[in-house]
Image (cartoon, rainbow, N blue to C red):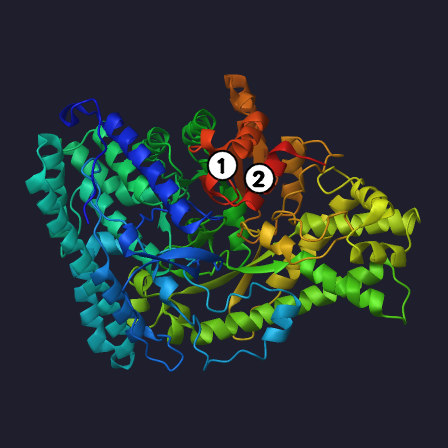
């Protein structure tokens, strides 16, 4: 299926690169509107998925790559071939064969004003029903997984970083040759190699069909400039069926096809250290007179338009030398000119480019789209070294996801999949204590039970990790990303089954402020002041603070000095909870030897986690969102917006310190950095947070009036992009509940 260019009063021959980007941006907004109309709101990244033609579309419910149930669009008429009585397909050969069949049926996508071809339109994950082989039973774990409402990770996909240098060096044909060479050395892994070969042959066929589609469009294109662009696309795609990329444009095109295939397969979305991946091609083409910066920025913008894949700019090499280059700045320039959602992280630290940091801040405040974000080099590197790694290995870990880092092609981490909701653990502990007639309720008894249940939740999580690592390769192996790992193809082992060097499984805690504020409110209002008895409190919780008396009690429990206030009871409780969680997770590996690394993050699950939870002692009503990751709750500052300094100090206090992050979320008024002095203050704030041990900073730059007007009049703000959490998205494309959460965070109602 070819694309079509929008009409313009200017001749297509006369269009500048910026004119073409303006057309492509309007095309993107039209795609976003169409996707929302077809599948409803999306509480996740705005991705590069292009809608199928309506006549080829069927809407279904499916599990996203982040483990969230979403409405999805599948290709009407395409059916998978099951290999199990359940109707599912399991194991590398069946998975690879079915993915190849989907690629063979998948439409092509070529736009005459875009220098890149290719986009995914369907999610292979939507066809995984059931998603887990029922013969591999873990019912022995389910009662406690459900008791603590764990996001346990069994069956989780991707969330590690490939080394795309492997593919850029070899190309699709070279990868196939490598695969066939190692197949002979590992006869035990025939099924895995069968699956991998199906994937490669499917991708090659898909790329070849893009060459044919572009050539066909070129033959019918009356405009000389567009025709030349389409002919160039056809030539590049035809070569890329077998050959590695040789030029900057070809390398960008290869990355588009990789990302579209990876995203289609299971939602994977990482380009990693993009400036270093593309730098050799950029420097070679510039030296040869084949490329200038304007053309490079256009190709980069077309690459970034294709997908919101995660990218790090700058940062240290293995010896600690700064890797920022001219290309790092050009990628920021491409983001700036494109003005569509992106996921860019700039590495910040001693010895790293201050100019890149400053330019990142300028783009953030000029464009007000919630990116780039900023990664604290020292805490991430030194923290990861606490796991026993040398500095050169720790420096290799790069920003590659919402809040996480990974070593490209060498580390399996399941980052941002496993979540332990402190609020659920607290709820179990509180109800258990209040049901125990043999004891007198008190805060220390509640803490003792909370700590015991938290320990058990982590133990159950560890058992689930082992079960996943033991069986995932039999269910749904990582066939696309396996191609870009060191050891998987060589050993004939899926990445989930011992194919790479390092296994560092991310385990995130969430709802920290909800629980810290609850402990503090109980200690202050019930124990110290005697304003309520424990039984009265429980009655209010069970009644969801109903009635005038309940509302008075709720406000009383709410209006304490909450986490983030500074030197408050709640701050002490937050530190105690975070340190206990960190110590329990980091203390020992899983029974089968996988290292677990603690972080604090909720992703976009604050709404879902809150919906399943009853009222809590911090004055939160049943069903309301819980707090986000390590951040204080909106309105923590006695009902007023907290200052950026308060937030930065609070989140620095609760960092786990083992290399996984606890991101600081800041929502700043656009006027704050309207002058050079203001920008310098924001720069100093971020540096101070990192000096105090901070790991990652996400920023929104949007005014109170703008966000409120967007909520009331979405039709006026179709292009408003906000930083939701680890990702940015179009505000009007979010669900009403998540919109409200973002609004509350910015406006900070008490």
- Residue 750 against residue 392 in the figure, above or below: above
Residue 590 seen from this side: no
Q: Residues within 10 Å of mark 1 (few under 14, many from 20)?
A: many
Q: Residue at x 85, y 70 (%)?
A: 436
Q: Are marks 1 and 2 in contact (CB under 8 Å)?
A: yes
Q: Is residue 444 left or right of residue 366?
A: right
* 274 or 377: nearer the viewer: 274
Q: Which residue is mark 1?
A: 722
Tell me, for residue 742, which label it has, or none: 2
At which x and y percent is residue 212?
A: 11, 51
* 308 or 398: nearer the viewer: 308
Choose the circle earlier in sequence order: 1 or 2: 1
At which x and y percent is residue 397?
A: 43, 51
Which SS class for mark 1? Answer: strand
The answer for how far apart the CA atoms under marks 1 and 2 are is 8 Å
At which x and y percent is residue 303?
A: 28, 41
Q: Is residue 70 left or right of residue 188?
A: right
Q: Residue at x 26, y 68 (%)?
A: 196
Residue 44 seen from this side: yes
């Amino acid at each position: 299926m070819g694309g079509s260019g929008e009409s313009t009063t200017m001749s297509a021959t006369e269009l500048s690169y910026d004119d073409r980007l303006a057309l492509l941006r309007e095309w993107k907004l039209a795609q976003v509107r169409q996707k929302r109309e077809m599948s409803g709101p999306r509480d996740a990244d705005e991705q590069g998925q292009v809608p199928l033609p309506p006549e080829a579309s069927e809407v279904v419910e499916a599990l996203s790559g982040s483990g969230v149930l979403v409405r999805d669009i599948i290709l009407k008429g395409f059916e998978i071939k099951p290999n199990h009585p359940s109707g599912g397909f399991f194991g590398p050969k069946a998975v690879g064969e079915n993915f190849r069949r989907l690629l063979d049926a998948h439409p092509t996508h070529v736009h005459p004003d875009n220098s890149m071809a290719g986009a995914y339109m369907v999610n292979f994950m939507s066809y995984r029903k059931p998603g887990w082989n029922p013969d591999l039973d873990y019912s022995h774990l389910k009662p406690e997984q459900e008791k603590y409402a764990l996001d346990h990770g069994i069956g989780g996909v991707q969330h590690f970083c490939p080394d795309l240098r492997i593919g850029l060096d070899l190309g699709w044909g070279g990868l196939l040759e490598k695969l066939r060479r190692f197949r002979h050395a590992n006869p035990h892994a025939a099924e895995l190699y069968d699956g991998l070969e199906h994937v490669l042959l499917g991708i090659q066929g898909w790329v070849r069909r893009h060459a044919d589609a572009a050539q066909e469009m070129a033959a019918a294109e009356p405009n000389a400039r567009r025709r030349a662009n389409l002919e160039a696309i056809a030539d590049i795609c035809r070569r890329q069926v077998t050959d590695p990329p040789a030029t900057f444009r070809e390398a960008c095109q290869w990355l588009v096809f990789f990302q579209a295939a990876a995203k289609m397969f299971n939602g994977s979305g990482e380009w990693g250290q993009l400036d270093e991946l593309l730098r050799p091609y950029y420097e070679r083409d510039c030296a040869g007179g084949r490329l200038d910066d304007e053309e490079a920025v256009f190709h980069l913008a077309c690459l970034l338009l294709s997908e919101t894949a995660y990218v790090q700019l700058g940062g240290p090499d293995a010896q600690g030398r700064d890797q920022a280059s001219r290309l790092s700045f050009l990628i920021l320039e491409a983001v700036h000119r494109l003005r569509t959602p992106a996921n860019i992280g700039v590495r910040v630290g001693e010895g790293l480019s201050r100019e890149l940091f400053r330019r990142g801040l300028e783009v953030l405040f000029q464009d007000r789209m919630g990116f780039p974000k900023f990664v604290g080099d020292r805490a991430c590197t030194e923290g990861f070294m606490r796991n026993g790694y040398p500095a050169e290995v720790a420096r290799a870990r790069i920003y590659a996801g919402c809040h996480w880092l990974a070593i490209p092609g060498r580390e399996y981490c399941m980052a941002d999949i496993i979540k332990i909701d402190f609020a659920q653990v607290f709820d179990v502990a509180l109800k258990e204590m209040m049901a125990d007639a043999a004891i007198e309720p008190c805060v220390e008894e509640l803490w003792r039970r909370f700590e015991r249940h938290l320990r058990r939740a982590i133990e159950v999580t560890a058992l689930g990790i082992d079960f996943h690592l033991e069986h995932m390769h039999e269910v749904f192996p990582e066939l696309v990303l396996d191609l870009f790992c060191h050891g998987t193809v060589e050993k004939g082992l899926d990445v989930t089954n011992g194919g790479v060097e390092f296994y560092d499984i991310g385990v995130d805690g969430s709802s920290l402020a909800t629980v810290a504020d609850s402990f503090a409110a109980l200690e202050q209002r019930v124990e110290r002041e005697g304003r309520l008895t424990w039984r009265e409190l429980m009655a209010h919780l069970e009644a969801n603070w109903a009635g005038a008396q309940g509302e008075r009690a709720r406000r009383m429990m709410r209006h304490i000095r909450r986490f983030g206030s500074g030197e408050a009871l709640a701050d002490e409780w937050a530190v105690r909870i975070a340190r206990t969680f960190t110590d329990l997770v980091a203390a020992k590996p899983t029974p089968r030897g996988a290292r677990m690394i603690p972080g604090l993050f909720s992703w976009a699950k604050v709404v879902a986690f809150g919906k399943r939870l009853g009222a809590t002692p911090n004055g939160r009503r049943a069903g309301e969102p819980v707090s986000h990751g390590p951040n204080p709750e909106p309105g923590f500052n006695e009902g007023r917006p907290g200052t950026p300094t308060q937030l930065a100090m609070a989140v620095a206090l609760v960092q786990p310190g083992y290399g996984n992050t606890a991101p600081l979320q800041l929502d700043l008024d656009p006027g704050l950095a309207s002058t050079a002095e203001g920008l310098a203050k924001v720069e100093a704030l971020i540096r101070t947070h990192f000096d105090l041990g901070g790991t990652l900073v996400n920023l929104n730059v949007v005014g109170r009036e703008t966000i409120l007007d967007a909520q009331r009049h979405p039709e006026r703000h179709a292009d408003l992009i906000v930083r939701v959490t680890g990702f940015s998205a179009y505000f009007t494309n979010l669900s009403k509940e998540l919109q409200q959460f973002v609004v509350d965070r910015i406006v900070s109602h008490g």
